[in-house]
Image: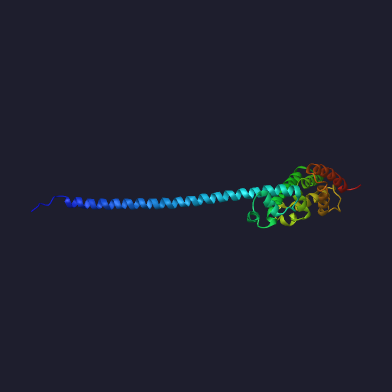
Amino acid sequence: MVAEQPGAADRGGAADRGGAAEEDGSAGQRDEVRRGGAAGRGGVARQGAGVQRADARRNRTRILTVAIEAFAREGLGVSIQEIARRAGVSTGTVSRHFPAKDDLYAAIVLDRAESLVATARMLAETQPPGAAFYSFIEVMAVEGARNRAIGDALAGAGFDIQAAAGRADQDLMGMWNSLLASAQAAGEVRADITVDDVKTLVMGCCKAGKDPDANQAAARRLASVVAAGLRPTS
């Protein structure tokens, strides 16, 4: 009869538990691997989305850069297809960023309108009413001569800036009207002149020629002639 070895059962149980522990450890490692793989896939997806967003931003910036230059030199008549060709993108890419042509116009023209309104406010705050009004006439004439998009927008050719400017900081015609009213109240401008009269005269100054540099010089000269005609006669 063989005597039972003390602790054998305990060692066997320990071995069983050790095996179970190893199995649990292996399962845990497998879980870690699976989780790591999922995280890796998520990282790749996020990285891909980031690249796409960066590409989209670059495309939008490129489209705006090309459109600003084209509209400034050639006016708002440049087609979306031509903007896309010069930007090196498809017309579909342009449409994704700017669903309608007016959206592209607004992104460019209203930004300039906002800057011009800020200039008008500065003139109103720092100069007497008559000086502020006549200074702004020259500013608008030169801007329209330098940037044909502004001249076209003022004329409503392709984009009606007056209808589109819903915010106070873009309401170019409203600011112009305010400068005119103040100058008339100060006796510096003929009482029968309207803001539409002024706009028409300034648009004529904008179209003195086709060369941007010569055009700006001519616009300044013509703005001084317009100013002389707007002053009250004795």
* Residue 116 placement (x, y as % from top left): 74, 47
Which of the two residues, 222 or 18, is positioned nearer the viewer here? 18
Q: Quadrant of the N terminus?
A: bottom left
Q: Say left or right for 31 vs 145.
A: left
Q: Is residue 12 visible?
A: yes
Which of the two residues, 54 or 109, is positioned nearer the viewer here? 54
Q: Quadrant of residue 225?
A: top right
Given the current orientation, which residue lies at the most extreme right position? 234
Q: Say left or right for 162 vs 53.
A: right
Given the current orientation, which residue lies at the most extreme left position? 1
Disc tally is 0
* Residue 192 placement (x, y as % from top left): 86, 53
Q: How is the image coloured?
A: rainbow
Q: Quadrant of residue 132?
A: top right
* Residue 84 placement (x, y as % from top left): 67, 52
Q: Is residue 185 visible?
A: no
Which of the two residues, 229 or 105, is positioned nearer the viewer here? 105
* Residue 38 placement (x, y as % from top left): 43, 53
